[in-house]
Image (tube, grey):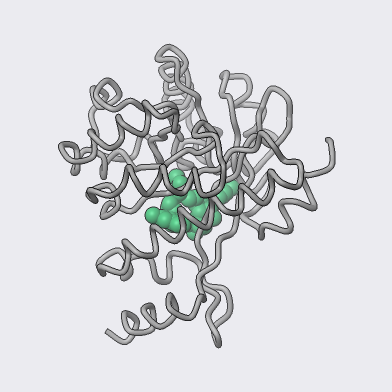
Amino acid sequence: LALQKELRRAFEGGEFVLHYQPQIDLTTGRIKGVEALIRWNHPTRGLLAPAEFLGVLEAMSLAQAVGWWTLEEACAQLGRWRARGLDDLRMSVNLFSIQLRSDTLGIRVLNALSHNALIPSLLELEITETIAIDQEERALGAIQCLRDAGVRIAFDDFGTGFASLSSLKRFPITTLKIDRSFVRDSGQDDETGAILEATIRLGKRLGLETIAEGVETKEQEERIKRMGCDIGQGYFYSRPVSADQIFERFAAPM
Ligand code: G
Ligand code: G
Ligand code: MN
Ligand code: NA
């Protein structure tokens, strides 16, 4: 309860900030996009990761307001980067389940794009397959409408949820984000390697972009490249960093 109260105060006081983690095009080695990840800039405890507060936040109605703020702020930041010359950078934003259930999802996303003069295809919305299935009825309409407008849709943490493979047919997704556990264990055991490779192939056969999460080593990068994965994300390239750090590190031609 104390944490709930603090979260409300923090949101009103502007203590939430977004950090951004690069997504690297494995063909060119260049940055393709970034994922926006929320942090709590706590007055006494410093910068807090989502693990410290997201569980409690998600159970509060405040999650919706924070989620819409994140969407607006991420789009505004993409607009600022574009004004400074990063003009084909993409932005990925995670959605809470409460946002997926909201009647206003479609209009909020389209507004965030138009406020910031963004082409819809520069925005990717990340939903976990489990959330998507729980909310299937309500989510599909809005997701389809956004997809028709050109917004990209990713299944996040793919392979760890409870969705069956047929959800790949029902949801108009563009992207599979393969859960980091598969990348992490793929060097240890052959089974995980086989699952990783088959998932990348499946994505390719379905015409989806594949992103491997949690790439931490050169060896893992080489493995996912060999398997035909499109994009890598993980500490090997960069931790999530501030907007300024993204600009400093990636604005210069590489
Ligand atoms: O760094 P990391 O600890 O940043 O993030 C942990 C988890 O929190 C991730 O699974 C991510 O999906 C989730 N997360 C981070 N930022 C956001 C956000 O802005 N909205 C939602 N819905 N989830 C987020
Ligand atoms: O949305 P999602 O669960 O995918 O968010 C990504 C989470 O993964 C964030 O908590 C981020 O800090 C974390 N993360 C990003 N790259 C790596 C990595 O290379 N290794 C590990 N262990 N975690 C990572
Ligand atoms: Mn994510
Ligand atoms: Na993920």
Residue 132 in which image quadrant: top left
Residue 11 falls left or right of residue 160 = right
Residue drawn at x 49%, y 34% is 120
Residue drawn at x 18%, y 41% is 138
Q: Position of residue 150 (x, y in %)?
A: 44, 28
Indicate which quadrant contains ligand 1. Answer: bottom left
Residue 54 in which image quadrant: bottom left
Using the image as rendered, state which of residue 73 and residue 164 is in the foreground.
73
- 31, above or below 102, in the image: above
Quadrant holding the N terminus: bottom left
Q: Position of residue 197 (x, y in %)?
A: 48, 21
Q: Position of residue 49 (x, y in %)?
A: 50, 67
Quadrant holding the C terminus: top right
Q: Residue furthest top?
A: 205
Residue 110 in which image quadrant: top left
- 142, above or below 147, in the image: below
Q: In the rendered picture of this protein, how many numbered marks are placed on residues? A: 0
Residue drawn at x 60%, y 35% is 232
Using the image as rendered, state which of residue 181 and residue 46 is in the foreground.
46
Residue 160 falls left or right of residue 204 = left
- 149, above or below 135, in the image: above
Using the image as rendered, state which of residue 218 and residue 13 is in the foreground.
13
Using the image as rendered, state which of residue 77 and residue 96 is in the foreground.
77
Q: Position of residue 212 (x, y in %)?
A: 53, 34
